[in-house]
Amino acid sequence: MFSLNLRLITIDGPVAVGKSSVGLLLAEKLSFQFFDTGVIYRTFTWKSLSVGLTPADVDALVALSQNTVFEFAPGNGSRLVVLVDGEDASRHVGASEVERNVALIAKIPQVRERMVSEQRRMATELRLVMAGRDIGTVVLPWADLKVFLQASVAERAKRRYTELVERGVETSYESVLTELEQRDHNDITRAASPLKPADDAVVINTDGLSLEDVVDRILALVRDREHLC
Ligand code: C5P
């Protein structure tokens, strides 16, 4: 695109708002790397369940998080993948047990501390678009540009339902909607790093906007910031 001073862009927002699709396309247009931080929480949840822990085993989960080695490696295109103790767990992160437990494990403050320090470590080395819930507020408050995506829960449920049906998953719109409402509730009301826009984030409501429209808006913000440098 053009040679940039800007190095770190954060994209936060609720579940199924399109953070990954937007972040990945944006990263590709800017020749940045893209990291979806949900993957590190999901990967750790998969590992915890596979050694027999449940979200109630708080002390053991904290110890496990401290003894697990996380690495980040190039995946498809601009996307970075997480290696957990050397293993790429990508194929497990969408499993329904992971889906059901991830928000409960992600609520534990000391587990979050460990994940946050890993996310910061990654951000020291790369030009990066990082997506999540607390990236602009907690993980990278010094980022050059912060975006917070919003969309109504009905619109997000519609998008997620269509995506699941296309992947051959049997479900109903109502159950997808209920699950999103439950996850929103967990993410917004948790004490540690609740989901909210940073004071200096640009909020974009994506209802009725295409993926390209949203990315174009962010690229316009990137150009504005560059002119201010
Ligand atoms: O974005 P995704 O749905 O993959 O995230 C899975 C879960 O991980 C979220 O529901 C949230 O509880 C947790 N998460 C988080 N902080 C982040 C990213 C994800 O707490 N930065």
Image (spheres, rainbow, N blue to C red):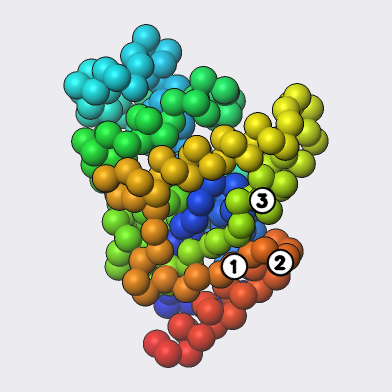
Q: Are marks 1 and 2 in contact (CB under 8 Å)?
A: yes
The x, y position of residue 178, in whole percent, is 59, 36
Spatial CA distance of label 1 from label 2 is 8 Å
The x, y position of residue 124, in whole percent, is 32, 57
Structural crowding at the residue carrying mark 3, measured as other residues with C-alpha within 10 Å and reported as few (<14), some (14–19) or many (≥20):
some
Structural crowding at the residue carrying mark 2, measured as other residues with C-alpha within 10 Å and reported as few (<14), some (14–19) or many (≥20):
few
Q: Residue at x 45, y 50 (%)?
A: 132
Q: Which mark is residue 205?
A: 1
Farthest bottom residue in view: 228
Q: Residue at x 35, y 30 (%)?
A: 105
Q: Secondary structure at mark 2?
A: loop
The kind of residue on which mark 3 rests is Ala
Question: Visible in this render: residue 64?
Answer: no
**Mark 3 or 1, nearer chain start:** 3
Q: Which residue is mark 3?
A: 154
The kind of residue on which mark 2 rests is Leu
Q: Which residue is mark 2?
A: 209
Q: Secondary structure at mark 1?
A: strand
Front position among marks 3 and 1: 3
Q: Are marks 3 and 1 in contact (CB under 8 Å)?
A: no
